[in-house]
Image (cartoon, rainbow, N blue to C red):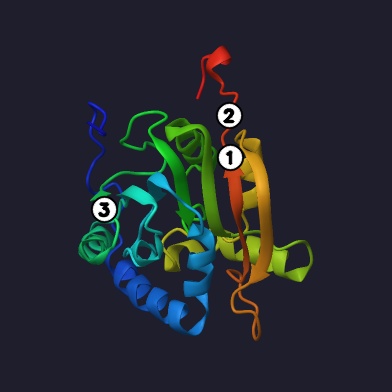
Amino acid sequence: MRRRSTPVPRDAVHHPVFARFYARLSVTADLRGGLAGRRDELFAGLSGRVIEIGAGNGLNFAHYPGAVSEVVAIEPERSLRQMAAGAAMRAEVPVDVVPGTAEALPVKSEAFDAAVASLVLCTVRDLPRALSEIKRVLRPGGELRFFEHTLAPGGKLATVQRAADRTLWPLLFGGCHTARDTVAAIEAAGFELGTYRRFRVPEKGVRLPSSPCVIGVARRSAVVDRAAGTG
């Protein structure tokens, strides 16, 4: 059994209007913004059991390589979860879409070879707790693959991001906070950073608060925190 004895409320997050908007926007971004290629990059070489945090409408499912034996896709928003369930039926790897939040993943510890966080860490209510949960469910040496919005490296755009996060941006975009320093947060959670790179979406044109992004990999230590009794 994957789930804990205490179930997570099915509707811990419910944004039906944003869900419909996101479903259309994400497909357009894949086709015109080059995000489909980013997803291929994110999943390259993945294998074994994978947990996806915040699966949205399931756009990632088509990009999982055949070496992945199972995907457990966590999605708290009801409308998006229903869309993801439809996408799971068309996926070439087994995908199980379940309700849950990043801060309380309804799965056993050390159960997964990899975790995927794709444009979701900007929306979680408690980022350190969410990263702690991801670390808990990864086996020793397991990977965290991340593709996220991130704080711009100084300058005017970072100021704009912070201002946006304090005002309407999170309300309009499903709780998204663009000024989070994603890489620093992952490292602070105790992950070992691997390779990562920063880029803009879109690469040309007007820079939005959500434009600065980062893609990369981090790992839970293979030495494990067993000696300290954590993890």
Which residue is identified by label 3? 94
Callout 3–callout 2 Cβ contact below 8 Å: no
What is the C-alpha distance between the residues marked 1 and 3?
Answer: 24 Å
Left or right side of 19 for 147: right
Question: Is the residue marked by circle 1 packed among few (<14), some (14-19), or many (20+) residues within 10 Å?
Answer: many
Secondary structure beneath label 2: loop
Which residue is identified by label 1? 219
Which residue is identified by label 2? 222
Callout 2–callout 1 Cβ contact below 8 Å: yes
Which of the two labelled residues, at mark 1 and mark 3, occupies the earlier sequence position? 3
- Residue at 39% x, 63% y is 60
Amino acid, disc 3: Pro
Residue 5 against residue 99 in the figure, above or below = above
Residue in front for this viewpoint, 35 or 170: 35
What is the C-alpha distance between the residues marked 2 and 1?
Answer: 8 Å
Residue 230 against residue 222 in the figure, above or below = above
